Image (cartoon, rainbow, N blue to C red):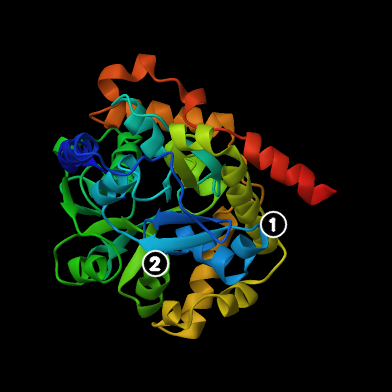
Amino acid sequence: MGYGKHFAAALLAATTLFAAGCRDSRTIPMADGRPQITIMVGGLEKVIYLPAMLTKQLGFFEKNDIDVKLLGEQSGANAETALLTGDVQGVIGFYDHTIDLQAKDQCLKSVVQFADVPGEVELVSKADTAAITSVRDLKGRNLGVTSLGSSTDFLTQALTGQEGLTTADYTRVKVGAGQTFIAGMNHNGIDAGMTTDPTVAQMVTSGEAKVLVDMRTEAGTRAALGGLYPSTSLYMRCDTIDAHPDIVRKLVAAFVQTLRWITAHTPEEIAAKMPPQYANAGKDLYIQSIRDSIGMFNGTGLMKPEGAQNVRNILGRYSRNVAPVRDRIKVEETYTTAFVEEALRGARR
């Protein structure tokens, strides 16, 4: 998910809705004494966001006395507008959005950090594998990103920037994710592009693409970006967190329980808990996609400060919002570990 050129429109829409008397983001609906939480997820079927649906499937929301509705939304502009206007109480997406929004004087915080690495892969199309064998070979090519200004856009710029390339050296093409990404690669729309599992497993297994850079592991991420890049997180408005710490505590506890469950179970066991339609390309392929990406989840929910700082450094170079104000960005205000630490203490008792 991302903002880019859509951010101004999204922010304007949010401002207009606020002025019209939209829902107070600090108000959380209740039913039969249970909080009714709505969370927007940047692609429910993506393995990088698997803990969202898995938590629901495992019943951990209910066990923590909260009701949670998960909404899938590929558009960062729509997700951010929904969060800013209070139509949803949280977003499960990339942590970098909290920094990008701080540059616009909006306060969002990651309350649980699922992953220290992006879980993203730079794929090269079958037709170009002989010519593209390194990041430097991406010069002059069409490179697929989810959208301009998205996390995949920032990561593409950071990845190529490590090799001295700038956006003047290649063309970024908006191709979305899933089937639209596959279509773009198979019909000469892009030569290479950044995407996640299960798309990666599907294209590699079929021979339609080859992995150029793998950021599903810590080693691969450090090699590609010069450090960690925390990605999947649950982030919320600061005023919502401040107004409802008890509800946030329950929500975080549910996700921490899921992260601990993941570390104790196999890809086969994880796949069996997920909705059957997520394996529409085949059960074995879905299990393979989980096996290839599941190591990205940190098992604790804690943010690593070095990772947060590296995200700020990267956005400070490649985000149009952050670059002009990078020196006043306060990274420590974009996440909190307090709720996760409390959940972990409770789990150990």
Q: Is residue 84 left or right of residue 266?
A: left
In the rendered structure, which amino acid carries the disc numbered 1? Arg
**How busy is the neighbourhood of tag 1: few (under 14 within 10 Å), some, or many (20 plus)?**
some
Q: CA distance from mark 2 to mark 1?
A: 25 Å
Q: Secondary structure at mark 1?
A: helix
Kind of residue indicated by mark 2: Val
Q: Position of residue 220 (x, y in %)?
A: 50, 48
Residue at (38%, 62%) from the top-left corner? 71
Toward which corner of the image does residue 257 lie, by quadrant?
A: bottom right
Q: In the rendering, at what x and y percent does residue 119 appear?
A: 46, 54
**Where residue 221 sits: x, y (%)?**
48, 45
Q: Pinpoint residue 345: horizontal percent, then vertical percent.
A: 78, 42
In the orientation shown, which residue stands out farthest toward the top? 327
Closer to the camera in the image, 318 or 234: 234
| Residue wearing tag 1 | 260
Kindly identify which residue carries mark 2.
Answer: 200
Q: Can you say whether 122 is above or below 150 in the image?
A: below
SS class, disc 2:
helix
